Image: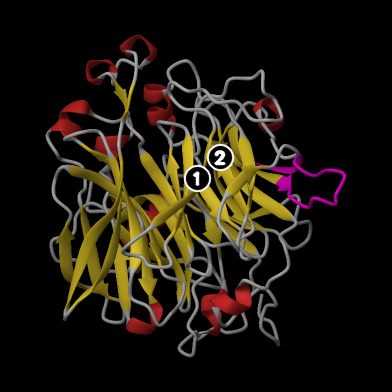
Amino acid sequence: MTRWTPDPTFYASPRDAAEAPPEKLAYVAAFDRTARRPDAIAVVDVDPDSPGYGTVVGWTDLPYTGDELHHFGWNACSSALCPTAPHPHVERRYLIVPGLRSSRIYVLDTRADPTRPEVVKVVEPKELADGAGYSRPHTVHCGPDGIYVSALGGAHGADGPGGIAVLDHDTFEVRGGWEADRGPQFLAYDFWWHLNHDVLVSSEWGTPAMIEDGIVGELLLGRKYGHALHFWDLRRRRHVQTVDLGDQYQMPLELRPAHDPTKTYGFVGVVISVEDLSASIWVWHRDGERWAATRVIDIPAEPADPELLPDLLKPFGAVPPLVTDIDLSVDDRFLYVSCWGTGELRQYDVSDPFHPVQTGAVRLGGIVGRAAHPARPELPLAGGPQMVEVSRDGRRVYLTNSLYGAWDDQFYPDGVGAWQAKLDVDTERGGITLDPRFFPHGEDFRGLRVHQTRLQGGDASSDSYCFG
């Protein structure tokens, strides 16, 4: 996998990446909630000039059942061009695909036939446990010196702490756990970094026992899920500081640092406030020599007829927004916020990160709204905008609708279904519109639910840059 010249999909700066050619294919994680059939990577044609546009044109079944594919990533990306990268000639070729429930990690080769990635290696749960001390692998990031994989659980039956495992760039073997000193950190979820500043940031969800059978009302109302950010010395792998958002702000999940490597701010979405069911967006930033986090967006719950709500929400008579994913355009201008509960995707201009301005919104699905797609206006949709991915040039946004199997069943007990949508972006004035030509759904995904999307050649949440 070593190249004589850098991979052409690597870019030294976010400005260069934003001028990359449009993607042709999208890879989508698809899983079987019953665990009786294998999960799969579905390949969707995203070339508007192709006769197969908006359809599933490739498919790879995994060799086992019960994995519950969730997040995944590339083996290598633009971070390989960083001055400190020891392997500048790796190539973006392999998809690293964890099973969140099984703790397996699959390596899929996309080079021979990009529409039918081939499984070339399986990292077994025991290898992850013995090598790194973790289970339930989640987020994948291609670092300059290895493949970083966050994990929610401990090893060999331990519920925690969760943390980060590092895989070898070339062999995909588990090098070990990343943390040299984890300080008070116990809960894990997402992580990302400011590479030029030697800073890693991590967020909190819950341990496997707290999430795998669905959200636990007693734990939520008891404010036991995660509510803090952790800041680390990336080079020394040591915990530096905890920033507690307040225990009413439960589950700070996805982290989106500024792509500009000279900046040291980023955004995190908080799923729910137990005081009023609202969701919120926070920006982390420097405050002198310390780190701080400031709440910059509040999204209120929407009143609803209790008869239309799942049992979990009936006592509240309202639909919480449930911000479960966010994504930041490569030029750091637009932040996209998925409100999985109300079925809304919001676009904010965050040119001033402390004063976001909403510039667009669309509705699809929703616990009560069940908004339809323009391609099938007669079809009420379940689920809502969930995983959101933005093209490198910022002109296209892709959505899928499943959150996590057990949580899907709680909030959409009549079935969440499967759909993917695409939006076109007005990159000058702001604004988003649904593409009526792009709506793979239902049996297009062979009865599986769909989660994260990765774009061929990279996307807004896959790459890190070291040059401004």
**Residue 122 visible:** no
Mark 1 lies on a secondary structure that is loop
Residue at 43 percent of width and 20 percent of height = 368
Report the residue that reaches farthest toward the top: 307
Q: Residue furthest right?
A: 51
Of the two numbered discs 1 and 2 on the same chain, state the one appearing first in sequence. Answer: 1
Q: Can you tell which mark lies on residue 315?
A: none
What residue appears at the point 63 percent right and 44 percent down from the top-left corner?
433
Residue 89: image x %, image y %? Answer: 62, 83
**Can residue 94 be seen by looking at this rendering?**
yes
- Residue at far front of view: 429
Task: Examine the structure image and report whether residue 405 is included in the region drawn in magenta.
Answer: no
Left or right: residue 74 versus residue 206 is right
Amino acid under disc 1: Met
Contact, CB < 8 Å: mark 1 with mark 2?
A: yes
Say which residue appears at 30% left-offset and 36% top-offset.
300
Given the image, on which type of amino acid does mark 2 rest? Thr
Mark identifier at residue 400: 2
The quadrant of the image that shows the N terminus is bottom right
Q: Is residue 15 above or below residue 105?
A: below
CA separation in Å, label 1 and label 2: 5 Å
Q: Quadrant of residue 239?
A: bottom left
Tell me where the magenta segment starts and ends, as one range: 44-61
Where is residue 39 drawn, in percent x and y?
A: 58, 37
Badge number at residue 387: 1
Image quadrant assignment for residue 408: top left
Decide whether residue 56 is among the magenta residues. yes
Residue 333 lies, in percent from the top left, at 48, 65
